[in-house]
Image (cartoon, coloured by chain):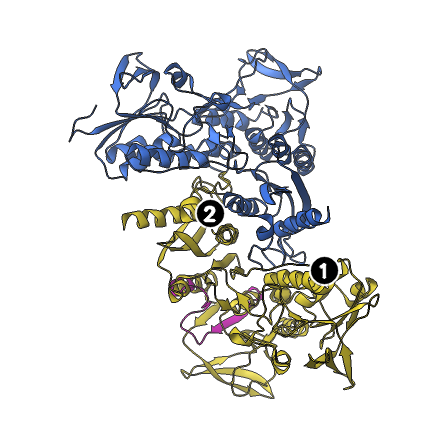
Chain colours: A yellow, B blue
Amino acid sequence: MTEKNQKQKIVIIGGVAAGPKIMAKLLRTFGNFQIDLYTEEDMISYSACGLPYFVEGLIEDVNKLIVRTPEQFEQKGANVHLNKRCTKILPQEHKIVVQDTKTGIIQQVEYDKLAITTGARPILPPIKNHHLENIFTIRKIKDGVNIRNKIRDKDTKKAVIVGGGYIGIEMLEAFFKNNLEVTLIERKEHILSIFDAEISDMIAAEIVNMSKGKVKILTSESVVAFEGGNGKVEKVITDKGQKIEADIVVIATGIVPNTEIAADAGIELGVSNAIRVNNRMQTTVKDIYAAGDCIENFHLVSKNYCWIPLGSSANKEGRCAAINIAGGYDAFAGVLGSAVTRYDTMSISLTGLTETEAKKFGFDVISSTMTKKDKAGYMPDAENITLKLVVDKRLKKILGAQAFGNGDADKRVNTVAAAIAADQTLDNFLHTDMTYAPPFSTSVDPLLSAALVINNQIYKS
Amino acid sequence: MTEKNQKQKIVIIGGVAAGPKIMAKLLRTFGNFQIDLYTEEDMISYSACGLPYFVEGLIEDVNKLIVRTPEQFEQKGANVHLNKRCTKILPQEHKIVVQDTKTGIIQQVEYDKLAITTGARPILPPIKNHHLENIFTIRKIKDGVNIRNKIRDKDTKKAVIVGGGYIGIEMLEAFFKNNLEVTLIERKEHILSIFDAEISDMIAAEIVNMSKGKVKILTSESVVAFEGGNGKVEKVITDKGQKIEADIVVIATGIVPNTEIAADAGIELGVSNAIRVNNRMQTTVKDIYAAGDCIENFHLVSKNYCWIPLGSSANKEGRCAAINIAGGYDAFAGVLGSAVTRYDTMSISLTGLTETEAKKFGFDVISSTMTKKDKAGYMPDAENITLKLVVDKRLKKILGAQAFGNGDADKRVNTVAAAIAADQTLDNFLHTDMTYAPPFSTSVDPLLSAALVINNQIYKS
């Protein structure tokens, strides 16, 4: 253990979002720390969420995705070790084992407090010939650079995206905007399966409608093999026997948390093999904290554990971990799973539980879905938004909201998130004093209309 | 009183927003009602808030501002009486006196339940020669039509707006967008004086900056006289001796509630002579309800009475009044004063108390103002927003928020409104799970950044 007047040794494993956040917060905190961050990558602190927009061409310089450089941290007194993979955690000895990815040299590093922020990695489904050239996953900066280079090649005309989650949809936008002919293949019945099925289907129809024949979405269909010539992908073969031509393929079939070294060290894992932490970001092993995409979350509505890896949560968890590592006290209660993405001009967002999830958790669900103008109907730029509110009939509590549309939909979901987080009842929520002026809303905001409809249904039924 | 099986007579005075809302809600409610609405105007149910955008030319057909016509209501069984001014309420006899504005004929109308929704009217300050031609106020449809006709006249080049509140700013946009040279004159030290002074000043500077020399804003200056030729306004004279040329003048120096007949009838008035009602919209006189711009409000943060006449509140109050008139039970707790307007691409919004107000009400105020990008800084359409959060240090409760900017500022104010309405603490608010993706936000939303800054200040101080 650290002697008095000696610096406390803080070691962080992982350098994308939560790790650098912990480092940054510790550097602003009073305390005598020696901070060492180890990452197997050759850079730290970048916005993986920005990659689809770099691929699309909205951002020219990939370096803009870098939030902070190792040099910026080192100037403030932290040590950043690139290309060093942590291969083992030794909790008894308060040490980790690190291997240089270039030289292979192995070293042991002592810690007083350890933070695991190893993130997640793409799942590669067992598809035949997935090692062919021009088949990509997208998670790291170099993936984005490679994909962009390929689509800027004038011979790249047809693309296939495997997987219809957020990343799949974001890559779909990137490819569509670069004039590729794109087929998105989702093995489940619906794309964006974290939404209720009828909402996902409306979104899918809208995407196809907006894309003027350039985009196809196939659901309930799986990719079983790739075919190629000269080592390069040329065709995508599905379980229904379709052969789809492709000059480029992106596989975005989900991610798994990087928690093998944590499990090896005897740290308890939870849902989806993510690391279980308490509300102070402490793992089940003394002096070891975790934050970011590699940890399990507690859901504030279902009151159950879940795994919803998001950059917004990583920041909150990183801050919480840092305060507690530094000897302070902070508690992060949990998440609502609030998330947003877009397809071209259409935003797609949700918070809390969907109707399907809410029923699964035993809530007495009532819901309302409506399509309304986002601002006064007479304003020339009024656009449709579709909102679904999910409420517990008996508790009269809002459980969740889903929204999409070309209008101003996503920020309304945040208004619901604030209400859910504060345990607001429906009766009070429908009186929320929301701002109104014709360029911004209707005199009864669509959100309040949805709440009123549910309220009327509850009292009549 | 009404006999059994006889229809209950509901009489509504006033036809712009709250009156028609009551009528519409009653028509959807079970109950045997005879509904009669009296208005001195020749139309009902229109969006006065939309007038500046009609003047600007964003809406071509003024009829689009009409929400519902008398015919639509009459088809559903209500009676709408246009051009009938209510001159007296006789509470003992349960009657009102109505005069036809065209024929002068007076009649008495019996009621079982009466709703006063008489709204408000512009204040006309005592400025010399204010009866000259081309000097307007703006409240009714015909005002909008007259102003628009005048600015479409090719000889109309210079405009003066007297008053720098919401309507003044909205008319400024309308005139600026129609290529007029505009001077806005505000007698107070700051325009938009419901904001904190430094925020108002930033907004004023931004308006001038966005207007490339076409817009001047004068503060701490009063208009004392108009000068004209041929009965038409030509010059505006200020107390500082300036003579400003003007082909058109709009006076937007505020409004007062139309409550004289209520006061005459012995109904208690409150702040600003607005009608005092309880949370069921009942006035102090039996069987008389009131709603909309003519009533006083209860402020959910200050817990004091106030007068904040807004279309959004009028709808909620109208609904509440209708349910209670119909014999049901509904309570409308109060308002936060949430409001929004815009100047060209800049939104301007607030909710709850400003710092100045909060101090006045004895709160232990701490605040944070920051200018941040509304989305990831690397996105090409990222724009600045300036946010001010006002918090009580000891209670750790959010008291209010002010926001402006070309970025997505106004909807973030609604997120704060939902949190305030639910009595959320700062500690919990800063963990609110807000949606994040680069085209929509930063990984730590600007709102949460502002909350974090205040939180850090509280713990350090």
Chain on which label 2 sits: A
Q: Is residue B285 above or below residue B74?
A: above
Q: Nearer the viewer, mark 2 or mark 1?
A: 1
- Which stretch did the figure color magenta? A175-200
Q: Residue B290 in the image: state x and y as whole percent.
A: 38, 27
Q: Amino acid at mark 1?
A: Lys
Left or right? Give the position of B375 relative to A441: right
Task: Name the disc covering residue B369, or none.
Answer: none
Magenta includes B121?
Answer: no
Please state which of residues A386 and A212 is positioned toward the viewer in this rendering: A386
Residue B419: image location, x then y, percent: 53, 47
Q: Which of the image's four quarters has the N terminus of chain A?
A: bottom right
Which mark identifies residue A25?
1
Q: Earlier in the sequence, mark 2 or mark 1?
A: 1
Tell me residue B453's x, y (percent).
68, 49
Q: Which residue is mark 2?
A: A374
Residue A253 seen in render: no
Q: Secondary structure at mark 1?
A: helix
Residues behind callouts 2 and 1 on a single chain: yes
Residue at image position (65%, 48%) is B450
Q: Quadrant of residue B4?
A: top left
Depth check, front residue: B195 or B215:
B195
Q: Report how far apart the C-alphas of labels 2 and 1 lie in the structure.
A: 39 Å
Q: Is residue B316 above or below residue B372?
A: above
Identify the residue at the far front of this view.
A4
Q: Chain of mark 1?
A: A
* Element marked by disc 2: loop
